[in-house]
Amino acid sequence: MTMPPSFTESKNKRQKARAAGLDPNYWYAVALSKNLQPGQVTRATFWGTHVAVYRDDRGAVHALEDRCPHRHLPLSIGLVEGDKLRCQYHGWAMDPSGALADVPHELFGMKMPQCRIRPYPIRERYGLVWVFFGDAENADKVPMPHIPDLEGPDRWACVPIEVTWKAHHSMILENVSDFTHEFLHRKWKPFADSKLTKLETNERGVFVSYDTKVGYGGLASKFIDRGRINTNSMELGYEYPYQWSNTDNQIKHWLICLPIDEQTTKGFFLFHFKNFKVPGTPLSVPRFLMEPIIKIANRIQITPLLGEDGVAVEAEQAGWNKHWDQPFAEISPAVHAFQALTIKKWEQHLEREAAKKLVKGSLNREARSESDEAAE
Ligand code: FES
Ligand SMILES: [Fe+2]
């Protein structure tokens, strides 16, 4: 059995979409803030690139190339000490800028080696730790997702969820944005009787709307105030590389996918809610009780519901690995639009990388010929 083709070998849109990466020149969530306590280090992987992400003893987060400059052990199995990350093997310690700061054994009369590894821009927002894996000089120019509903004293209630699925990111994007799979969720009914009413592609992304019955199953449905919220339609967006939904400006989510490799993706879901009502009454649930309720709903309903998607996309990936050369039977125009955007952005990224290489190559040639001339 041959494996699916690479992006450049792909012969059609679906093959390309299933082989495309995500442009690293965006901010990507890598961990839930609560899972990275002071003194802890973890490994974040973006499309095969490993980064050691740690929180120092004062609470600040840092990201370094996951490679000790000494003998290239992963630093993500090392120890956090103050604001430094110390390698497990001979104990060399790197500071947050990526410079070697300490060698705890004899130097044999030599000076401290001048070693440096790559630091990555890192931020923390909305209960998530974010890393910029692209060119560091772009980090400040590229905006993170802006979610005003999760900022300030009146911010909505949200308890982030992290999942890891053995599936390509495009399968996950299609799963969350395309409601033709409501059959899969016939038990929980997060959306039902869906009809696509809008599909628009513009310079910001792909936007779809559905007439659908939102959230009629399970515990969470009892807290939705249907007197105040129109739960008969939902809008969704694929604002590359992120995805979101909006139900009447009262229930929303953002999904930030972290593409680990061609067949593994982490997803960080930020479901957030403006209001809940006390079941069986018209009264609002006090704000301070909303997060505890979401925690329970996440455990007993949302995680099992997302688990259905996880099983489906992992099975889709397995099916794709076997049957990638079979005819393309996709009938949803929304899925075609998502794939087109994923492909276009990846092609643009590859073109920019190729142009950068070309410039670098010609600069190197110039430098070489100048030094040859100087030598003559
Ligand atoms: S390999 Fe890291 S200190 Fe030696
Ligand atoms: Fe789903």
Image: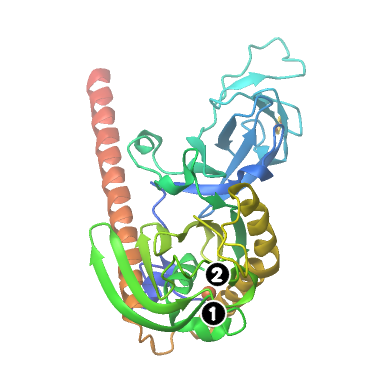
The location of residue 314, given as percent across then percent down, is 59, 74
| Residue named by callout 2 | 167
| Residue named by callout 1 | 316
Tell me whether circle 1 and circle 2 mark residues in contact (CB < 8 Å): yes
Sequence-first tag of 1 and 2: 2
Is residue 140 visible from the viewing direction of this image? yes
Is residue 147 visible from the viewing direction of this image? no
Image vertical order of residue 300 relative to residue 68, above or below: below
- Bin the neighbour count of mark 2 within 10 Å (Cα to Cα): few under 14, some 14-19, many 20 and up: many
| Quarter of the figure that contains the C terminus | top left
Q: What residue is drawn where x is 37% and y is 71%?
A: 16
Element assignment for label 2 = loop
Q: Amino acid at mark 2?
A: Ala
Q: Is 308 situated left or right of 20 in this image?
A: right
113 or 103: nearer the viewer:
103
User: Residues under labels 1 and 2: Cα distance?
Assistant: 8 Å
- Bin the neighbour count of mark 1 within 10 Å (Cα to Cα): few under 14, some 14-19, many 20 and up: some
272 or 100: nearer the viewer:
272
The location of residue 111, given as percent across then percent down, is 63, 11
52 or 110: nearer the viewer:
52
Q: Amino acid at mark 1?
A: Glu
Total number of numbered discs in the rendering: 2
Element assignment for label 1 = helix
The location of residue 344, given as percent across then percent down, is 29, 63
The answer to which quarter of the image holds residue 80 is top right
| Quarter of the figure that contains the N terminus | bottom right
The location of residue 230, given as percent across then percent down, is 41, 70
Q: Is the distance from the Cβ of mark 1 to the nearest ligand 2 atom less than 8 Å? A: no
Q: What residue is drawn where x is 52% and y is 48%?
A: 29
